[in-house]
Image: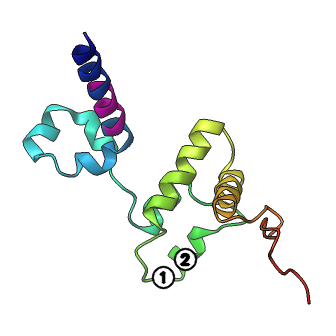
Amino acid sequence: MLFYISILAFLLLLIMVSYRYRAFIILHFPQRFKLLFPTLQNYAPLSTFSEQANAGVTSSEFDIEANIHDGDSRTGLDEQGVQEVLEIMRRERVSFDQARLIRQNRILARNGIDPSGMPLDAKAITRL
């Protein structure tokens, strides 16, 4: 009985992980398989500034369109960061700027810094 439960748990874990990383996994499927499931084509990574601007990754405070008009030669924003911001926007139903702020506060918290920029470590020297 425990054997079957562990197999079920493993399969559920495999399904959850494959759903979470579907954009990366789909890139490795053969083209014939992708043609059988056209909805798999929806998960293509955003690679240029114009694609990212069309996906809503721009605002008046963070203007990607200025990079497009200036002829910026870079390929675009950090793909992982863009996906995190889009996921926050979808999950928490916030604007692009609010999602960027939430992501930045999470990064600061992981590194032991509060949202105001002060370190949370009691031994940190903040003034001389």
Q: Is residue 55 visible?
A: no
Please identify the residue farthest to the top as the structure is shown: 1
Identify the amino acid type marked 1: Asp
Quadrant where the N terminus sits is top left
- Residue drawn at x 82%, y 68% is 122
Q: In whole angstroms, how far apart are the C-alphas of marks 1 and 2?
A: 5 Å
- In the image, taking residue 21 as reference, residue 28 lies left or right, namely left
- Look at the numbered disc 1 and give the secondary structure of its residue: loop
Q: Earlier in the sequence, mark 1 or mark 2?
A: 2
x then y, percent, for residue 32: 7, 41
Query: What span is in magenta?
Result: 11-17
So how many labels did they put on this image? 2
Left or right, residue 7 beside residue 66: left
Examine the rendered structure and indicate whether residue 9 appears above or below residue 108: above
Q: Position of residue 91 (x, y in %)?
A: 59, 37
Residue 67: mark in rendering: 2
Name the residue carrying label 1.
72
How packed is label 1: few (under 14 Cα within 10 Å), some, or many (20 or more)?
A: few
Residue drawn at (26%, 26%) of the image: 11
Percent of width and height locating residue 3: 22, 17
Give, as a three-letter code, the residue at label 2: Asn
Do the residues bearing badges 1 and 2 touch, measured as CB atoms within 8 Å?
Answer: yes
Is residue 24 on the magenta stretch? no
Q: Residue furthest right?
A: 128
* Residue situated in front as seen by the camera: 22 or 76: 22
Indicate the quadrant containing the C terminus: top left, top right, bottom left or bottom right: bottom right
What label sits on residue 104 in the rendered view? none
